Image (tube, rainbow, N blue to C red):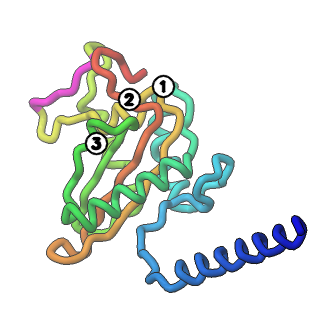
Amino acid sequence: MASSMFMALRAHGRFLLFLALVACADRAPVTRPEPVASLMGSPAAQPNAAADEFLTVQNQARAAVGVPPLQWSTDLAAEASKMVQYQKEQKGCDFVDMSSSPYGANQAWTSYPPSPAEVVGSWVAQGKYYNHDDNTCDTDAAQGDCGTYTQVVWRRTAEVGCAQATCAGQQEGATITLCLYNPHGNVQGQRPY
């Protein structure tokens, strides 16, 4: 008796699983920008070409000031991908306030689709406004913000993940780029290196 009851429950469970699969298969696919990592969620995943571009320029800047290289995080890349999708679909490709994020963040908006190396290069170029002796940015200079640079070279930051999304509508062709950093940098009163 117990055996036939178990068989009936098991068959019922398979039927419910079949119904769930059919219901999911009937949904329209959701399009999202792909994170630049090749295998989402796998910490040992090897980065792809875009991820390599993001890493190479940042790690060159880090090596120049004597800090260890960043590692690629597929989890951060997936989170960045979700965020640029949100920026694209809900914010008209405007920046979002990342101040409450547990991660450090660098964002870029361009009117064309730049390469990852080009975007990171613009962040690293802000290093010319950073004064290590007094740990300040030269805010009097044109575009004197150097927070994107200090996040790139922040000694305690160990991993990064980035994503890009191309905008539509009024900002068609524009591109949003976001890199997330863990642990975050730009801690007030601390030097990046």
Structural distance between the alpha carbons of marks 2 and 3? 13 Å
Write the residue at 46% across / 42% down: 58
Point out the image quarter for the C terminus: top left
Which residue is at the front of the view, 82 or 2? 2
Nearest to viewer (mark 2 / mark 3): 3
At which x and y percent is residue 109? 25, 58
At which x and y percent is residue 172? 22, 76
At which x and y percent is residue 9? 76, 70
Work out whether 12 lies above or below 154. Answer: below
On screen, residue 41 versus residue 110, left or right, reads right
Residue 116 at least partly seen: no
Mark 2 or 1 closer to N-term? 1
> Residue 98, which numbered label?
3
> Residue 185, which numbered label?
2
Label 2 secondary element: loop
* Pointer 2 with pointer 1, Cβ within 8 A: yes
Work out whether 61 lies above or below 165. Answer: above
Structural distance between the alpha carbons of marks 2 and 1? 7 Å
Span of residues in magenta: 135-140
Point out the image quarter for the N terminus: bottom right
Q: Quadrant of residue 136?
A: top left
Residue 103 at least partly seen: yes
Q: Which residue is mark 1?
A: 156
Q: Give the crowd class for mark 2: few <14, some 14-19, many >=20 residues within 10 Å.
A: many
